[in-house]
Amino acid sequence: MREIRSAAMVVNAKSRKGQKLFQTACAAMKGLPYEVDARAVEDPDDLEDAVRDVLSAKPDLLILGGGDGTISGLVDLMVGTDTVLGVLPLGTANSFARTLGIPLDVPGAIEVIRTGRPRRIDLGMIDDDYYANCAAMGISPKIAETVPHGLKKMLGRVGYLGWAAWQFAKFKPFTLIVGEGDDAVRLKVVEVRISNGPYHGGTELVESAQVDSGEIVVQAVRGHVKRRLIHNWASSWFKLPSRHEKVREFRGRSIRIDTVPRLPISIDGEVLAKTPVTAKVAAGVIEVMAPVQS
């Protein structure tokens, strides 16, 4: 097993829990057998420069603290390096941490850093942009575009769900086009998830997606009325057999996707693209510190 001898940590101190828990994380890491260059970044615009700076020292491990959007926005910088990713989940949904089985509390996540093993995993891609967990079309980008940051910070998941309900009232189903030419498949849908892992919004929605499968999964929730989406989310939350109804999945290494009308795409909670796009998988492109698998 690869030995970790040097490490750095960059925390998004503007994430919902970042400022409060940075010191907690530093204290929890005191027992590690190596020093950690720990940095709290209060301006999200400075995160990329901070990560580039610590990566220039070629640490064996880089711990990223923040939500799914923070990790997805910075993971591009780790592709092509020998640095192992460590995850400190400080966001609202923490879907990537859930996918990897990493505890959502700081002591538990640091214990994975201490006792875990590097695991080679895939990243998803929307065109040339890497991401960690899940991209989506439908209500998710609408929420991500409009949710007030203060609401999310103060009320967390409860506030986020409340805002989602408000935006849902203005949402309309749309047409998904998978593939090109005569072989293209057209579906009327209420949501599309482009998944590298099973979790989206903190809920296990795409069970067939695995972070080391070498394939990307496009899951479409079919329907002409938006109550179909409510049914899918609720049945998935309670793990009812009906969660598989009106769902169609496409999987592969590269899948062309378009919509009518053209729609924005949220990538791990941040709106960063617009249809049409090519969804791809970058198989085994990074290593992440994960719990030891039984």
Image (cartoon, rainbow, N blue to C red):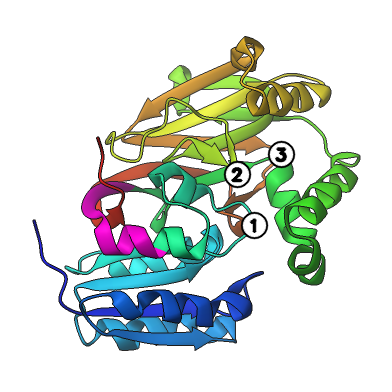
- Going by the numbered disc 1, the residue's amino acid type is Thr
Over which residues does the magenta segment extend?
110-122
Asked whether residue 114 is drawn in magenta, I would say yes
Please provide percent x and percent y for residue 169: 91, 39
Which residue position is annotated with label 2?
Answer: 202
* Residue at image point 39% right, 57% down: 130
The quarter of the displayed image where residue 197 is located: top left
- On screen, residue 57 versus residue 150, left or right, reads left
Distance from disc 2 to disc 3, alpha carbons, whole Å, reads 28 Å
- On screen, residue 87 versus residue 253, left or right, reads right
Q: Residues within 10 Å of mark 1 (few under 14, many from 20)?
A: many
Q: Residues within 10 Å of mark 2 (few under 14, many from 20)?
A: some
Which residue position is annotated with label 1?
Answer: 92
Asked whether residue 178 is drawn in magenta, I would say no
Q: Is tag 2's residue or tag 1's residue first in the polypeptide sequence?
A: 1
Q: Which mark is residue 261?
A: 3
